[in-house]
Amino acid sequence: MKKGTKITLLSVGALAVIGLGVGGGILIHDLYFGPSRDYDNLVVNGMDRGVLMDEYDSISENPNVDYTKEFTPAEAANVAYTLFQSNKYFATRGIGVADASIVEQEIFSTQIRAGDSYFEESNSKSAFVNVAFRMYEEGDSTMQYRGVVGEDLQDGIFASEGTTYSNEVYAEMMGRNVHSVETYVINEDTVIDTDKTADMYGTTSFKKVEDGYSLELELDPYTSVVNYVRQMKTISNLAEEPYFYYVHLSFSLDENLELKTMTSYEKYYAKLSSGIGSNTTGALTTTFYSDYKAEIPVLNAPSF
């Protein structure tokens, strides 16, 4: 998902708080001098999914299989993403809210795969900020369009001229390509076990429930976002990559480990190129539609 667009609310929102004089010098100090992290030399790799899927294929036909006894939480997440992205047709829809200072930002995102064509839309709207992005990936290139949100959060209005990038350049800027629905790096090291930290937003667990499986992941707020912060910096014209305080993911999976929903909970500090920054908390729930044969929408047509 392209949740990085939520950061755009900081530009006017933070200035509005300063103008109102709320908190005086303490608030202004927080807006300008937040924490930072250096990602330049950080390399975090994903898991070997070939091995995981071989194991999954060998046990998935057993009607009595309990995947909590076969996979760790990190492995289960990687299997679920692999299963979903292997569909020739799929769609996702995300709805969320980000809160920075006095500004509440509504967020909408969607992705569609139709064979070898991929589409992504990311809209964000508040009293101060209105921005929308559409991306189309076809073959070796990606076209990006920038626009604004209409009356409905799901209706973007886009300029007819976009920018074309090679998929390699696009991934370098954004941390991933449009064909990927994954924002975070999930492996055994980026998933935090309950005995590794006392300051957690949630706890990591993988449980069998009545209608499938419940998967909770508490992620390392530095290593898991190494790709995500590149997207956020690029889209929102940030002075540097954001500093994350926490990332927690709550998955609902079906009995075969297919993705149903995922809710991400985040808190981070981000600073604009102007030097103004603020803490932001956000939550976004994404629904996954396997084998959903939605068409790639033409520019300015509704997504789905």
Image (cartoon, rainbow, N blue to C red):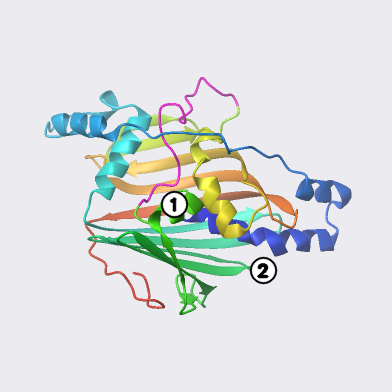
Name which quarter of the figure residue 15 lies in.
bottom right
Check the image and report above or below for 22 versus 163: above
Q: Secondary structure at mark 2?
A: loop
| Residue 1 appears in the rendering | no
Check the image and report above or below for 119 versus 68: below
Nearest the eye: 15 or 140: 140
Amino acid carrying mark 2 in the image: Phe
Mark 2 neighbour class, 10 Å CA radius: few under 14, some 14 to 19, many 20 or more? some
Could you tell me what secondary structure mostly forms the magenta stretch? loop
Q: CA distance from mark 1 to mark 2?
A: 29 Å
Q: Position of residue 129 (x, y in %)?
A: 63, 68
Q: Which mark is residue 171?
A: 1
Does 5 sit left or right of 9 as displayed? left
Does 88 sit left or right of 137 as displayed? left
Residue at position x 38%, y 35% in the image: 46
Residue tagged by mark 2? 128
Q: How many marks?
A: 2
Mark 1 neighbour class, 10 Å CA radius: few under 14, some 14 to 19, many 20 or more? some
Q: Position of residue 14 (x, y in %)?
A: 74, 58
Does 33 sit left or right of 76 as displayed? right
Nearest the eye: 130 or 248: 130
Q: Position of residue 183 (x, y in %)?
A: 44, 47
Residue 186: within the magenta? yes
| Residue 51 appears in the rendering | yes
Which residues make up the magenta segment?
A: 180-198
**Viewer-nearest of discs 1 and 2:** 1
Q: Position of residue 303 (x, y in %)?
A: 36, 70
Nearest the eye: 23 or 6: 6
